[in-house]
Each structure stands twice: as structure tokens, then as C-alpha cells.
Amino acid sequence: MTATLSETATLTKIDIRNVTKDFEVRDTGGAFTALRGVSLDVREGEFLTLVGPSGCGKSTLLDLVAGLTGPTAGEITIDGTPITGPGLDRGIVFQQYALFPWRTALANVVFGLEAKGVPRREREGRAREYLGLVGLTGFEERYPHELSGGMRQRVAIARSLAFDPDVLLMDEPFAALDAQTRESLQEELLGIWGKTGKTVIFITHGIDEAVYLGQRVAVMTSRPGRIKEVVDVSFDSREGDLRADPRFGEYRHHIWTLLRDEVAAAVVQERKVAVPRG
């Protein structure tokens, strides 16, 4: 299962080196190891998907890249600079939309621009531009409760893109959506990625989603999470329905083969102890 990644994505943007993350277990006084010795490079402008069994530390790894928490050991750098905390060079989209219910779609997107210090006269125009990019022209004045789940997630994506981060971090953003909406947003997200050239790390539990979206798929082991294999995904063309391409099934089968034993191990672990979000 080898393929050639696009030559446009050859420079390392994010470098994860020998990262371990432990959490203190307060009731026992011990430590819980979520990640151990994780090494992974994410290339400039690539779309990398990350899959693994429940509790393997996928979300923990994304939190580390976001700077929301720090590693116990190892280092993560962006453009060669160590990550020491959150930064406007990284935008985050979670499974839950995290929109302000008292703000309209437009005002939710404007919020991110306010945080970046974009001049007031420029904010609305840029917010409208990105709402248009995600297909929400005409819905600017709607409040979150007046939007469907897919529309709310589009607003969240627009808000993350509007302040122009170099890296977009996405933690199962489509998991709560119905199948038709999810597939529609997958296609739209690829279109946005193609237009903006952002570096994307996308967490998913779905193998089909990982193969459809990713130029590479990083497969994680059961807890403590490590990188088991990184699979290059390449199609002759991305025109038409990729899922009907015979190679799609080959990639899917290969990734499931990598995951099968890890999923079984994770089930055993879950029966023994409750684990953090991952």
C-alpha cells in the first residue's frame, strides 16, 4: 500500500517527536499514560486524517498540537518553533459547534476576527466572505437555533478559517451529523482545503471518511496511543465518486486490518477502567 504524496506537500509544517502524555489519577495517586513515544510529521498544505480505537489518545494529541496542554515528554514544533500554548496560527473545529447562541452566524464569525484584532471596518466583510465560502450566503443573520446541524458546523468552520490560521485542527467535526449531511460537508471541506491550502489534521472514527478526505491516514494503536502506520492515499483522479474506485476499497481494507487488533484491545481496556476523551 504505497503511493506518492503530492509534491506540493513535502515541507514539514508540524513535527511531533517522541511525545508522551501522562495524566495524574487523583483517586489512586498514580499516572495514566494516554500517549507514549508518538512521532509524526505533518507536511505543509497536506490533509492528514487520524484514526484509532476509542480511548487511544487522538483528541489528546490534537490538544497538544493546539497548545491546550503540554506533553509530559517530547516536543511538538510548528515551522521549527516549539508549541508552548494556543496560538492564532491554529484554528480548531470540535464535534460540538461551540457557537454563541446569542450571536448571529455573522457575529459568531466576527468574534474570531475581534480576537485577532482585525480592524472593525474589515471584520464584517471578511466574515461574509467566509460564510459564503462554506455556502451560507443569505444566512448571515440567523441565530444558531435557526440553523440545521450541518449549517452550524459550517459556521464553526467559517469562524476558524476567517482569522486565517496556517493550520486547521478538526476533532470529529461531522460525527453528530446524518450521513447525507456528513458526505456533503466532506466534499465541501475538500473544496475549501483546495482553495485555501491550509494544513489540516482531521480526527475521525470512520475509515471511509479518513480515506475519502486524507492524503495520508495516520493509524494509532490502542492505549497508550502510538503511531502504528501512516498510509499514503493516492487516486488517479478525485473526480466523480471516489468510493466507487477499486483502490478506495483496498485502502479501506488495509486500514481496517491495521485497526482490527487495536479495536479489540481497546474494548478489553474499556472493561477494566474508564479512560479520558480520546
Image: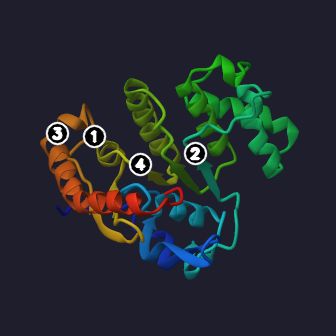
Quadrant, the N terminus: bottom left
Q: Is residue 158 left or right of residue 175?
A: right
10 Å crowding of disc 2: few (<14), some (14-19), many (20+): some
Residue 142 position in % (x across, y down) = 71, 19
Which of the two labelled residues, at mark 4 and mark 2, occupies the earlier sequence position? 2
Residue shown at the point (49%, 60%) measured from the top left: 275
For label 4, the residue is: 204
Residue shown at the point (47%, 37%) measured from the top left: 174
Outermost residue toward the left in this view: 246
Residue 59 position in % (x across, y down) = 52, 57
Q: Nearer the viewer, residue 163 or 157?
A: 157
The label on residue 245 is 3
Q: Amino acid at mark 1?
A: Arg
- SS of the residue under disc 1: loop
Q: CA separation, marks 3 and 2?
A: 30 Å
Q: CA separation, marks 3 and 4?
A: 21 Å
10 Å crowding of disc 1: few (<14), some (14-19), many (20+): few
Which of the two labelled residues, at mark 3 and mark 2, occupies the earlier sequence position? 2
Q: Amino acid at mark 4?
A: Thr
Residue shown at the point (46%, 51%) measured from the top left: 202
Residue 148 showing in the rendered view: yes
Q: Is residue 135 above or below residue 25?
A: above
Give the foreground label among 2 and 1. Answer: 2
Q: CA separation, marks 1 and 3?
A: 10 Å
- SS of the residue under disc 3: loop
Give the foreground label among 3 and 2. Answer: 2
Q: Is residue 245 above or below residue 103?
A: below
10 Å crowding of disc 3: few (<14), some (14-19), many (20+): some
Dots 2, 1 in contact, CB < 8 A: no
For label 1, the residue is: 238
Q: Amino acid at mark 2?
A: Phe
For label 2, the residue is: 94
